[in-house]
């Protein structure tokens, strides 16, 4: 059985809020589940012939999937989502939507939106999901879920 370990133990990570920790935990869990499924499907394809070439193919598959979680890729998609959300919402709400990347922790993004702008932000995320790489799509699906959870928790 494949044992996956986190390259950065949580003790070494810096969380500025509980939401950051929740997002990290959910993304880590989703990505680990994805890696397990990829490994299992790879083993099904390769069958019993598991040699060096099979390991190379597995590493290549993992690298392809991992590219979607690159900070530059995420920043690119956040910019697209921000511009789409601003174009979908009324003029008076456009200034209430902003997404900024942390200059120190590149995988951390600060997302601000007014209560009335949240549906447009969710709509922009859902609109762009089919165009994203697989790992990026998983990331933004979790971001959308967290936005909806936080919105319902604070505004209901």
Image (spheres, helix red, strand yellow):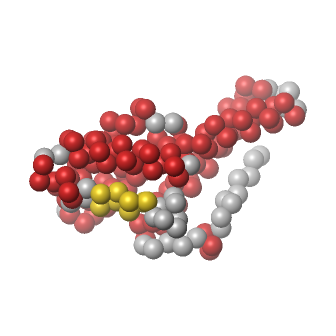
Total marks in image: 0
For residue 120, above or below residue 132: below
For residue 134, above or below residue 6: above
Residue 145, how many percent across, how many down?
37, 51
For residue 59, above or below residue 11: above
Look at 32% across and 36% down and name the residue there.
Answer: 127
Look at 43% across and 60% down and name the residue there.
Answer: 101
Look at 37% across and 37% down and name the residue there.
Answer: 128
Seen in the image, is 21 located left or right of residue 65? left
For residue 89, above or below residue 96: above
Is 114 or 18 nearer to us in this picture?
A: 114
Residue 105, visible in the rendered structure: yes
Seen in the image, is 149 located left or right of residue 91? right
Residue 30, visible in the rendered structure: no
Is 111 or 19 nearer to us in this picture?
A: 111
Residue 37, how many percent across, how many down?
63, 39
Query: Which quadrant holds the C terminus?
Result: bottom left
Residue 63, how many percent across, how many down?
67, 40
Corner quadrant of residue 147? bottom left
Residue 73, how many percent across, how many down?
50, 45
Seen in the image, is 14 located left or right of residue 99? right
């Amino acid at each position: 059985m494949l044992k996956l370990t986190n390259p950065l133990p949580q003790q070494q990570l810096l969380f500025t809020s509980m939401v950051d920790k929740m997002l990290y935990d959910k993304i880590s869990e989703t990505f680990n589940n994805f890696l397990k499924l990829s490994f299992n499907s790879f083993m099904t394809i390769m069958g019993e012939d598991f040699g060096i070439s099979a390991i190379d193919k597995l590493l290549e598959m993992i690298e392809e999937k991992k590219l979607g979680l690159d900070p530059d890729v995420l920043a690119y998609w956040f910019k697209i989502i921000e511009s789409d959300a601003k174009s979908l919402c009324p003029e008076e709400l456009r200034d209430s939507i902003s997404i900024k990347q942390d200059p120190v922790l590149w995988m951390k993004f600060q997302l601000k939106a007014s209560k009335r702008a949240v549906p447009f932000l969710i709509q922009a995320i859902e609109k762009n999901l089919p165009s994203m790489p697989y790992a990026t799509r998983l990331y933004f699906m979790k971001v959308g879920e967290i936005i909806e959870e936080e919105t319902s928790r604070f505004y209901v």
